Image (spheres, rainbow, N blue to C red):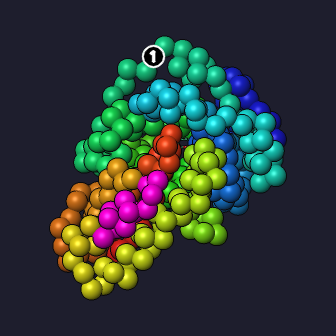
């Protein structure tokens, strides 16, 4: 496995791979890697000749400076995990290398980029598109791998790929959970032990709401999830939106769509740590 800091060095290597007609899979990450990332890497290794993993904590997608400052940074450990899982190249540039001048491009793909995370973290998806489009231009992959945990992010990246007419297959990979149901996230390492102990309640109540939804209205199901989570000491719901899985627009009744997803963001603990998760109520 080779680690690259410079765009030109990675591009030279990929040029050679392309000459040999080797396919390229890209796994974009911000580091602090866990088993969820490892599953994306393994999938890419299986489906491509070359797997490139980018490890870049992208400043332009953080709307909260404290969130960026406290985000875990573990490059050495990340490289061990990547090597064990068969990655070929790690691309770990500095911020100056990625953004020699400020990126002034504006990406908006309403409605998918403006609701939920788009509304609560202004500028977040713009930053995600700035960095992901750069990574796509640098590596020119056949396929790029994204975890379903960041479910809205996948919809935004797909919209961007369509708008930029990029010939890249966006591969959605299943969410990976701890045995107690907590969705794996780099932010989980920021949880104090007592916060880690209550965090699985998010998925517990989401999961239980599938059964509840069978005999209750969408509105009652929404309220039930919010009140159960808020009743847990140390958890506070920022938003819970039950949306159409394609348009990401709020829906009012179960009959209104045959693809329905509940997306939630919860603050956990005193710092607090912001955790996201989702549940599929209907999938055609
Ligand atoms: O999902 C993430 O870790 C980031 O948003 C991504 C896609 C690597 C872009 O910085």
Residue 134 appears in view: no
Write the residue at 30% across / 37% down. 108
The spot of residue 70 in percent (x, y) is 58, 32
**Is 132 covered by the magenta stretch?**
no
Q: Name the quadrant of the C terminus.
A: bottom left
Q: Quadrant of residue 147?
A: bottom right
Name the residue furthest front. 233
- In the image, residue 24 sits, relative to residue 16, either above or below, namely below
Q: Which residue is mark 1?
A: 102
Write the residue at 53% across / 60% down. 198
**Is 230 covered by the magenta stretch?**
yes
The spot of residue 191 in percent (x, y) is 59, 48
Secondary structure found at label 1: loop
Classify residue 67 as left or right of residue 192: left
Q: Residues within 10 Å of mark 1 (few under 14, many from 20)?
A: few
Q: Which residues are magenta?
A: 224-235
Classify residue 37 as left or right of residue 277: right
The spot of residue 6 in percent (x, y) is 69, 23
Q: Nearer the viewer, residue 19 or 156?
A: 156
Write the residue at 77% across / 33% down. 3
Q: Name the quadrant of the N terminus.
A: top right
Q: Nearer the viewer, residue 206 or 20?
A: 206
Q: Quadrant of residue 31?
A: top right
Q: Nearer the viewer, residue 3 or 22?
A: 3
- In the image, residue 148 sits, relative to residue 260, either above or below, namely above
């Amino acid at each position: 496995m080779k680690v690259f800091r410079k765009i030109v060095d990675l591009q030279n290597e990929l040029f050679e791979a392309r000459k040999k007609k080797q396919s390229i899979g890209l796994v974009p990450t911000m580091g602090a890697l866990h088993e969820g990332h490892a599953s994306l890497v393994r999938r890419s290794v299986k489906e491509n000749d070359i797997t490139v993993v980018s490890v870049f904590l992208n400043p332009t997608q953080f709307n909260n400076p404290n969130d960026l400052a406290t985000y875990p940074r573990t490059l050495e450990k990340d490289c061990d995990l990547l090597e064990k899982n068969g990655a070929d190249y790690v691309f770990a540039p500095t911020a100056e290398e990625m953004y020699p001048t400020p990126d002034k491009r504006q990406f908006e793909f309403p409605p998918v980029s403006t609701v939920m995370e788009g509304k609560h973290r202004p500028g977040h998806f713009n930053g995600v598109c700035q960095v992901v489009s750069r990574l796509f231009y640098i590596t020119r992959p056949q396929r790029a791998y994204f975890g379903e945990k960041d479910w809205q992010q996948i919809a935004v990246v797909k919209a961007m790929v369509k708008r930029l007419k990029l010939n890249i297959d966006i591969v959605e990979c299943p969410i990976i959970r701890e045995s107690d149901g907590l969705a794996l996230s780099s932010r989980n390492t920021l949880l104090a032990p007592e916060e880690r102990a209550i965090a699985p309640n998010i998925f517990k109540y989401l999961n239980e709401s599938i059964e509840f939804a069978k005999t209750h209205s969408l509105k009652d199901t929404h309220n039930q999830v919010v009140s159960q989570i808020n009743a847990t000491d140390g958890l506070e719901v920022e938003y819970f939106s039950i949306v159409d899985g394609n348009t990401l627009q709020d829906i009012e009744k179960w009959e209104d769509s045959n693809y329905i997803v509940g997306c939630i963001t919860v603050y956990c603990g005193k710092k607090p740590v912001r955790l996201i998760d989702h549940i599929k109520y209907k999938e055609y």
